[in-house]
């Protein structure tokens, strides 16, 4: 495991399908709704959607590395799996890699649902999740 956790959160931040999935999760979890509603009305321009994206932007260089905007799945996973990030938003393929007996974090992490903002709904682009290094978090009732 790394000598110290240098950042709290790593995620897929480069221009790709992954960051689009992340953005949809953030927006929905902040109560920002959908990008286009069932009646084909564009609904993305609303205060909660804006707050979600502004919040995610504020993570860059604070709780997330400055270059997180260049990370794909593997860049985020490699940093997290080395023990250098407390949290990682990624896809299920990363779980068995982190749990592998030769992994430095094997037995030292767990996964949970993505967080939500205030009393909004939790949402994810199936099957995304948040991995946590060094602590166990259990979903409450």
Image (cartoon, rainbow, N blue to C red):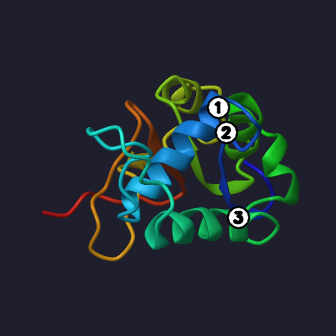
Q: Using the image, determine if residue 118 lies above or below residue 109.
A: below
Residue 63 in sight in this render: no
Look at discs 1 and 3 and give the one toward the viewer.
Answer: 3
Provide the residue designation for mark 1. 103
Q: Is residue 70 visible?
A: yes
Tag 1's secondary structure?
loop
Residue found 79% across the figure and 50% down from its top: 68
Measured Cα–Cα span from mark 2 to mark 3: 30 Å
Q: Earlier in the sequence, mark 2 or mark 3?
A: 3
Q: Residue at x 35, y 50 (%)?
A: 113
Q: Residue furthest bottom?
A: 118
Q: Judging from the image, what secondary structure is the residue with disc 2 in? A: loop
Quadrant of the image containing the C terminus:
bottom left
Which disc is residue 104 wearing? 2
| Identity of the residue furthest to the left in this view | 141
The residue carrying mark 3 is 57
Mark 1, other Cα within 10 Å: few <14 / some 14–19 / many ≥20: some
Q: Is residue 75 above or below residue 29?
A: above
Residue at (26%, 38%) from the top-left corner? 38
CA–CA distance between discs 2 and 1?
4 Å
**Residue 125, picture quadrant:** top left
Image marks 1 and 3: residues in contact by CB distance under 8 Å: no
- Are circles 2 and 1 on residues that touch, CB within 8 Å? yes
In the image, residue 34 sits, relative to residue 30, either above or below, namely: above
Q: Position of residue 124 (x, y in %)?
A: 38, 43
Q: Is residue 13 left or right of residue 70?
A: left
Q: Which of these two is toward me, 115 or 22? A: 22
């Amino acid at each position: 495991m790394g000598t110290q956790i240098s950042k709290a959160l790593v995620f897929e931040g480069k221009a790709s399908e992954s960051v689009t999935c992340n953005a949809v999760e953030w927006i929905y979890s902040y109560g920002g709704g959908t990008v286009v509603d069932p009646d084909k009305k564009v609904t993305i321009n609303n205060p909660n959607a804006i707050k979600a994206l502004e919040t995610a932007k504020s993570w860059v260089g604070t709780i997330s590395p400055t270059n997180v905007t260049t990370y794909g799945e593997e860049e985020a996973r490699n940093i997290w799996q080395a023990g250098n990030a407390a949290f990682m938003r990624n896809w299920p393929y990363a779980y068995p890699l982190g749990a592998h007996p030769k992994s430095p974090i094997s037995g030292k992490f767990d996964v949970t649902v993505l967080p939500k903002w205030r009393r909004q709904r939790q949402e994810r682009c199936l099957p995304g999740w948040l991995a946590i290094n060094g602590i166990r978090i259990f979903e409450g009732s």
